[in-house]
Image: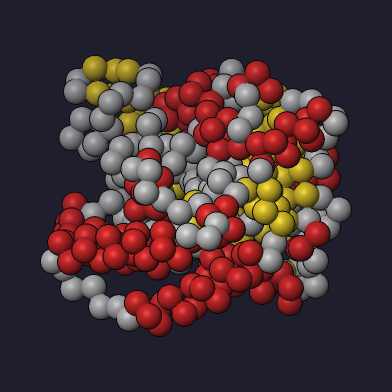
Amino acid sequence: MAVDLLLGLQWGDEGKGKIVDVLTSKYDIIARFQGGPNAGHTLVFNGKKHVLHTIPSGIFHEDKINLVGNGVVIDPVIFKKELDKLQEQGIDYKKSLLISRKAHIILPTHRLLDAASEASKGKAKIGSTLKGIGPTYMDKTGRNGIRVGDMEMADWKEKYRALADKHETMIAFYDVDVQYDLPELETEFFESLETLKSLTLIDSEEYLYQAMKAGKSILAEGAQGSLLDIDFGTYPFVTSSNTTAAGACTGLGIAPNKIGEVIGIFKAYTTRVGSGPFPTELIDEIGETMGRVGHEFGATTGRPRRCGWLDLVALKYACQVNGVTQLVMMKGDVLSGFKTLKVCTAYNYKGTTIKHLPFNIEEQNVSPIYTELPGWNADLTDMTEASQMPKALLGYIEFLEKELELPITVVSVGPDRKQTIVR
């Protein structure tokens, strides 16, 4: 059996959680492959809103296995809070949630180090969520990290103390005002670790290999978006992991030749949280309207998202890097009411027209070249069939399909799992 991938094609916040939830019924296993609690996947069903940060978005389907892979970094404190909320809703997560022993653990000092590093940058800060993600991945690549499986080892506490002491030395080096009470933070941390230990810990690469041999269907779930990839994103304003399709292989231990469908998700417009270049950003009434109608606030941080027209140059790049086979368009309903829509189909790059993403897309180098399309004024939120869509929306979709040379198989017209049209 092949493993299908579902990942974001922009700067995150595309609506991956909703679509994973919608697709979960088709799969036996939902496996998260990278990122940490800097991600926020929002699901809406039965009139209720649910926000997940680390746990795979298939957790509300009790007959499915949800696996946190080795490429994920886990904050035990945040993880426990997620589990507590699931328990309040009557979700029996213990029988369906599996944790890779090779996943790395975010320590309290990772979060403090993140805050100190960001504060030291001043105006050059990258817009970190301050969840300790970057420092944890730095320890992973520096071969200093602590993994879930280390909790089962006799020298676990010694490893923890050595790394935490090292972090405190680094925090002092930054020489910024970071106030903290480490013993208090550690009390909550070690209590939360007991909850993590109580879950089923597995050698996930072997588990998934045997699952594939047994014919089980697997959906790999990514966090953030392709333009935040540590290698292929708008560096240095990126996350600390590989958010692209390649990250699923390293984040789960799946061979490249086992990848099947690559489902790419994008918004009908573009948003970005935090700092970094954004060629199609609208700092005007149109951008404000997109943000207000689309409720564009970060699921993890609550920060308002910057909004702008759809950037097809960046989107095409993301499709190429990921080997996308089909597309899902989110938030088509948010664009209702605009008389004219714009789509960026090329860049003016230092006086030359280009249609690929260059090394640097900072404002001084790049300006968008737009194609205008007619808008629509219909309320899409009650539509259930593609045949009900207004002509201008169908024209918008067909234009994108032609430019991207890929089919848009699903269109979301609202936040609820029912507000999803399959084409």
Whether residue 417 is situated above or below residue 235 in the rendered picture: below
Q: Residue at x 42, y 26 (%)?
A: 313
Q: Residue at x 58, y 30 (%)?
A: 249
Nearer to us in this view, 241 or 200: 200
Whether residue 241 is situated above or below residue 182 in the rendered picture: above
Position of 83 with respect to 225 (left or right) is right
Whether residue 297 is situated above or below residue 412 in the rendered picture: below
Position of 359 with respect to 148 (left or right) is left
The mark tally for this picture is 0
Position of 287 with respect to 192 (left or right) is left
* Outermost front residue: 154
Residue 74 appears anywhere in the view: no
Horizontal and vertical percent position of residue 169: 21, 63
Nearer to us in this view, 152 or 214: 152
The quarter of the rendered structure image containing the N terminus is top right
Nearer to us in this view, 199 or 351: 199
Horizontal and vertical percent position of residue 158: 41, 63
Horizontal and vertical percent position of residue 316: 48, 25
Residue 105 appears anywhere in the view: yes
Q: Residue at x 45, y 65 (%)?
A: 157
What kind of colouring is applied to the model shown? secondary structure
Q: Quadrant of residue 191?
A: bottom right
Q: Quadrant of residue 355?
A: top left
Horizontal and vertical percent position of residue 171: 22, 64
Q: Residue at x 78, y 56 (%)?
A: 96
Q: Quadrant of residue 115?
A: bottom left
Nearer to us in this view, 301 or 75: 75
The quarter of the rendered structure image containing the C terminus is top right
